[in-house]
Each structure stands twice: as structure tokens, then as C-alpha cells.
Amino acid sequence: MVLTVTRLSVTRRRRPVLHGVSLALNPGEFVGLIGPNGAGKSSLMEAALGLIPFTGISTLAAMPADRRARHAAYLPQSREIAWPVSVADLVALGRIPWPGGGRSGIDRIATDAAIARMGLEPFRKRTALRLSGGEQNRALIARALAQDTPLLIADEPIAGLDPAQQLACLRLFRELAGEGRTVLASIHDLGLAARFCSRLVLLSNGHVLADGPPEAVLRDDLLRRAFNITVRRVDTPDGPAILPV
């Protein structure tokens, strides 16, 4: 298992947010975390990483900090670039957990590969603060890729991206899973989640309401309970389209 959480509970500002959540992630999975706002998706990711207090067990949070940084890369929901560094230097920060600290030949190879994979070569020398919001998002994804970890945890990674870049990002995550890595990403677009993820976890009111293949999770009765909506499914040559109605 790449990550296991067992009976994980979180209370924030005196309000229970997660209630005894258990979850195990395997190599080669692209797991989409779905659910309404306030369901506990971000709290689950942060607790699993050991970033906020929780009760229960997280195999990732139990690791020493240096080992954890080599095991999991994290793309938080709030993404802000604070310093006027170049895109290349920003991406190279992902190599800090490794022995070269971003300066070795191996680090440069990993940084260059991440920049190329996110289509950022034309922006390599540009100050990251001068990028558009979507370009900054891509640069931060590249930083996480450069970290070269078995697990990538991404909180709403396609927020702020245009439709073409949303598709490119999710294709990339699916490719990473095909290469044997594990991706856990929160996604609000149910159609994209159904199309790209190998597995979905539906959170509602701090509980896991459903966990399994997209077709088993995106059922009318479950979506009605979680979102209070019904959906219309349209099968296309590229995969299902799911329209809330």
C-alpha cells in the first residue's frame, strides 16, 4: 500500500469534519476524491499528510518528515508563489528532499523533465510571478512532478485551468498512474472524474459514502444523498459526460 488511513477523524474550530475515515491507496491508482463543499476532502488530505491534528492512523503522517517528503508530493488548494524566482528555480524546489537539494545533475534532469511534461519550456526563465494564474498552477504541478515521489496528492489541481489544460492535467495524472505511481486528487467535475480516474471516493458529511470504480460510485441514489442532485449521463467516444440536472 502507498497510503493507509484508519479510523481517521478531524475536528476543526470545534466542529467535527471527518468521522472515522478508513482508506487504502495502491500503486498505479488514480483516485478521485469527490463530494460537496465542506465534505472533508481537503481535511482528509491534510490529515493524511500530517499537516493538521487528527485522531486515528495515517501511515504517511507516521513517517519522519524527510522520508515523507520523498514519498509524497502535495499540491494544496491554496497556491501562491511568494517570491520572484524563475520558473526553472521554482520547479527545482521540488528536489529539496533529495540528496542534491536541487543542484545535482540528477536534480537538473528531473527539473527539466517536469518542465517539459507541463509544457513550460517557453517560460523557463520567466519570473514565476509574471505568469498567468493558470500558468502558475502548471508550474506548481511541475514542481510536484520534479519531487518524483510514489504518491502525488493534489487538492483541486484543475481549478483555474482552461478546458484544454484541465484535460492535459488529468491525462498526465492518468499517465502517472499508468507508470505505477499513485495519484489522489479532489475533483469537482464529475464527468472528468468519471472519465480519467480509475477509482472514486465519495465523501459526504465527513464519511465515506462510496468507494470504488466510477460507475459504481456515480449512481443516482448516492449522488442524490451527497449533492441533492440527479444527473444525466451521455456516453461519448471519449468517455461518459455527466450533467447535473
Image (cartoon, rainbow, N blue to C red):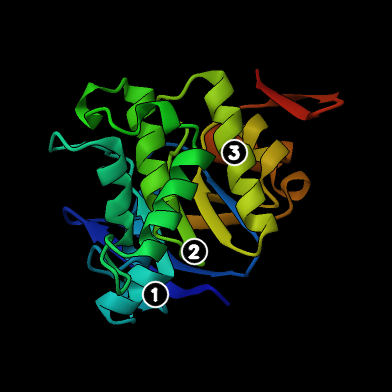
Measured in 3D between alpha carbons, the distance from the residue under mark 1 to the one under mark 3, in whole angstroms, is 24 Å
Measured in 3D between alpha carbons, the distance from the residue under mark 2 to the one under mark 3, in whole angstroms, is 15 Å
Vertical comparison of 194 with 75: above or below: above
Amino acid at dot 3: Leu
Q: Earlier in the sequence, mark 2 or mark 3?
A: 2
Which percent across, then down, holds residue 140? 35, 41
The N terminus is located in which quarter? bottom right
Amino acid at dot 1: Leu
Q: Nearer the viewer, mark 2 or mark 1?
A: 2
Residue 53 in sight in this render: yes
> Residue 151 shows which numbered tag?
2
Q: Are marks 2 and 1 in contact (CB under 8 Å)?
A: yes
Judged left or right of residue 36, residue 17 is left
Q: Earlier in the sequence, mark 2 or mark 1?
A: 1
Q: Residue at x 33, y 46 (%)?
A: 91
Q: Secondary structure at mark 2?
A: strand
Q: Nearer the viewer, mark 1 or mark 3?
A: 3
Residue where numbered disc 1 is placed: 60
Amino acid at dot 2: Leu
- Crowding at mark 1 (Cα within 10 Å: few <14, some 14-19, many 20+): many
Res 97 quadrant in image = bottom left
